[in-house]
Amino acid sequence: MKMTKQEKSWILYDWANSVYATIMMAAVVPIYFSTVAKAAGQAGDYWWSIATSIAMLLTAIGAPLIGAVADYFGYKKKLFVAFLGVALAFTTLAAVTDSWIWLMVSYAVSHMAFNAGILVYDSFLPDVTTKDRMDKISAYGFAYGYIGGSTIPFIISIGLIQFGDRIGLTGSMPVRVSIGITVVWWLVFTIPFLRNVKQVNGIQKPDSGISKEVLGNIAKTARKIVKDKKILFFIITYFFYIDGVGTVITMSTAYGATLGLDATGMILALLVTQLVAFPCSILFGNLGRKIGSLKMLRMAVMIYLGVCIVGFFMGFGLEEQWFGVEIALILFWVLAIMVGTVQGGIQALSRSYFGKIVPPENAGEFFGFFDIFGKFAAIIGPALYGVTKLLTGRSSFAILSLIFLFLVALIIMRIGKKYLVD
């Protein structure tokens, strides 16, 4: 069965917004921020982890409310547009400021709006497709996000950073232009979503207004989650492993920059991550349908355990080389490939599995709790990284500390085995 216009338009937003995740969150801007902060006598990876934690905390606090409001007919698209506008505005601010403080603020606010928009976007999944197609559509979303928004603008940014001086782009201008490309790409490829995706499932707005009812609905949904052991065990498991995944994404280049790795080498390695992630995301979606989403999720968590161990060994023997190349940089490339095999798959199957086990008419509300668990988890990871770095003085121990999150996720999966079934 071919994809419908609604399915294609929904997938295309992953293509659109992934440019933000790559340029602002994972690659170009974290490295740039570390450089700017270092020039001001500040520890870039430390402040980046703090900004990320604050952004996640504030988003998490508002997530259930956002999800509950989104369930009312006519509100889902309005919320999406509002968060999109804020995210684009503050991403633009990051392109025009040269202050490390304002760069951090613009990142934090745009990150909050970006994640709030993703919450609403995810809740549209039951509106655009059926349960039996959710794994496929969710996986294709992440896959095309990697090959599109995460790759094409990324390659352009690499070219600007490496060769920008040949066309008159000196100093920080290549980074600023890259951020500008992020804004334009994100906006243009969101247009099909805005035109074609509509809210199908939802609840009617009460005559007396929604404020009081929203709070009541949030409480009802919380009770439903506690009573439904399948949803409860999955969402707690998700809380821990997605925290580790998110921290690896947001801290990897800041970690590498702190170790003194070559920025161009790291960016090229992350490009390899996107290219590997495209087929692997689709493969995860197909295998999820054939052998089970949960089995694939367990495998992905175990691979992330390996990622943390590789990251730990990157911090040792920084001066050593192998065939003229730093061993630490080689390990960064190994890490990039490992992450590429599972990054899209673990996020896609988490989204689709949750979408299949919640009632479609209350998808926004349930995804609000799904998001709050993910965002509160994302506070712990960067904070754990930052505190470990502060106590030990070594970034390698900070990255190793993330193993704790993945181990706890595997333990909870084991405890809730009889409930967590496909």
Image: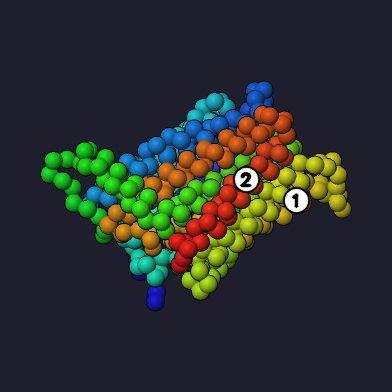
Q: Is residue 147 left or right of residue 203?
A: right
Amino acid, disc 2: Phe
User: Which secondary structure lies at badge 1?
Assistant: helix
Q: Residue at x 67, y 48 (%)?
A: 308
Whether residue 167 is visible: no
Residue indicated by mark 1 = 331
What percent of the width, then of the height, locates residue 65?
Answer: 32, 41
75 or 398: nearer the eye? Answer: 398
What percent of the width, then of the height, locates residue 207?
Answer: 12, 44
The scheme the figure's colours follow is rainbow
Reply above or below: 53 against 415.
above
- CB under 8 Å between discs 1 and 2: no
What percent of the width, then of the height, locates residue 398?
Answer: 67, 38
Q: Callout 1: 10 Å neighbours few (<14), some, many (20+)? A: some
Q: Is residue 384 left or right of residue 358?
A: right
46 or 14: nearer the eye? Answer: 46
What percent of the width, then of the height, locates residue 203?
Answer: 22, 53
Between the C-alphas of marks 1 and 2, the distance is 21 Å
Q: Callout 2: 10 Å neighbours few (<14), some, many (20+)? A: some
Mark 1 and mark 2 lie on one chain; the one further toward the N terminus is 1
Q: Residue furthest top?
A: 41
Whether residue 316 is visible: yes
